[in-house]
Image (spheres, rainbow, N blue to C red):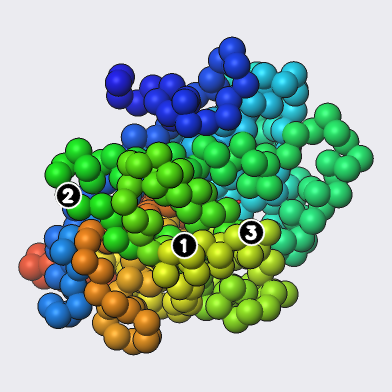
Amino acid sequence: DIPRQGIIARYRDWLPVPPGAEPITLGEGDTPLIRADRLLEQLPPDRRPPGLFLKFEGANPTGSFKDRGMTMALTCARARGAQAVICASTGNTAAAAAAYAARAGMECWLVLPAGGVAAGKVGQAVACGARILPVRGSFDDALAAVRQVVTERPDLVLVNSLNPDRLEGQKTAAFEVVDQLAARGEDEPAAVFLPVGNGGNITAYHMGFATYATAGRLGRLPRLYGVQAEGAAPLVRGRPVDQPQTVASAIRIGRPVYGDRALAAVRETGGRVLAVSDEEILAAQRLLARLEGVFVEPASAASVAGLLKLARGNEPGWEVPEGPVVCVLTGHGLKDVDTALRAARSGDAGSADLAALEAEALEPDAIV
Ligand code: F0G
């Protein structure tokens, strides 16, 4: 097939696209699956799986996995005659909605938690001409507002993951994980780690793996591990969190819409949910960048933080997988440069031999 033609062209037979619909695409999907041997060495030798891979979703056109869902949502909405879309977002959904709506020639309304979205994401949405409505509170408050608005304005199509077209598009990442490992002669994935906010993406991966299993393309579903930030871990705590807090703003969510589906996905595959601290998230972000050259936003580093935590034995419940482990890196580090600079400044900024130069050096953010 032709590379980077977008997930609808690539997987159309597996997607409920209205007949004749012209895809709204930016060439999303087909993202790198990166072997991470240096990161793997961070796990205790007796607790290492046979391989570790990073599914780098930050390589999508707007820098996150949301593009997979948004190409489907906008394609289907336009095919049904819609002219405007709306969503609540911690930022990535907003950036993707704005970009795909612009491409579709449609209007885009974004309801965002004031002060809760990384600058890169707001910049993307503004540049694409979206109308931005900040609300006080968290993502959960923004989503509640949007759900209310769409009952009064049926002309606005909701493109949060409540829209089933979104999950259909996002399930193609699971197809790619299976197809890419097979193309390299690797075993099937044994475990997949994902950051969890609203629970939509882990639900989509579960759908994708189950679809491939039913079609005979996958022998056994990988164990799904859903990783939340400690201050925003309603699925781990078993109850909603009213004022979610975490450095990982993308997953700062206290009332996940797909909570039950996410828990079912981990239960049915023999995985689990777990929480990691902000320190563990930032440490994993740093390791990814320094050992593998992969710069991700904090929420994305949660998947790696979860793997490190389980494999290092700081949490019970880790059976060493017999096949490859995949960590899904949901968003690019350029989305949230401020957090990376702050983390570098507040501690270990790295060691270099250029001692004299270092003595003179300014903080990294003095450059911009
Ligand atoms: N990682 C990133 C980078 C995200 O932006 C999100 C969600 C998730 C993980 C979690 O996915 O919600 O399906 O469990 N971002 C949404 C947004 C909430 O508005 O961009 P989930």
In the shown orientation, is residue 226 left or right of residue 81? left
Q: Upstream in the sequence, badge 3 or badge 1?
A: 1
Residue placed under numbered mark 3 in the picture: 258
The image position of residue 327, as x and y in percent, is: 33, 59
Local packing at callout 1 (Cα closer than 10 Å; few below 14, some 14-19, many 20+) is many
Residue placed under numbered mark 2 in the picture: 186
Residue sitting nearer the eye, 268 or 248:
268
Secondary element under disc 1, as helix, strand or loop, is: strand
Amino acid marked by disc 1: Pro
Secondary element under disc 2, as helix, strand or loop, is: loop
Instruction: Please state which of the two labelled residues, at mark 3 or mark 2, is closer to the viewer.
Output: 2
Q: Upstream in the sequence, badge 3 or badge 2?
A: 2
Secondary element under disc 3, as helix, strand or loop, is: loop
Residue depicted at 48% across the width and 31% down the height: 14
The image position of residue 311, as x and y in percent, is: 27, 78
Q: Is 337 rendered above or below residue 68?
A: below
Q: Is 232 rendered above or below residue 122?
A: below
State how many labels appear: 3
Q: Is residue 87 visible?
A: yes
Q: Which label number is shown at residue 335?
A: none
Residue sitting nearer the eye, 340 or 240:
240
Instruction: Please state which of the two labelled residues, at mark 1 or mark 2, is closer to the viewer.
Output: 2
Q: Is 329 rendered above or below residue 94?
A: below
Residue depicted at 26% across the width and 82% down the height: 312
In the shown orientation, is residue 91 left or right of residue 276? right
Q: What is the spatial separation of the Cα atoms under label 1 and label 2, in whole angstroms?
A: 24 Å
Amino acid marked by disc 2: Glu
Residue placed under numbered mark 1 in the picture: 195
Q: Quick one: which residue is furthest to the top in this view?
A: 20
- What is the quadrant of the N terminus in the image? top left
Q: What is the spatial separation of the Cα atoms under label 3 and label 2, in whole angstroms?
A: 31 Å
Q: What is the spatial separation of the Cα atoms under label 3 and label 1, in whole angstroms?
A: 13 Å
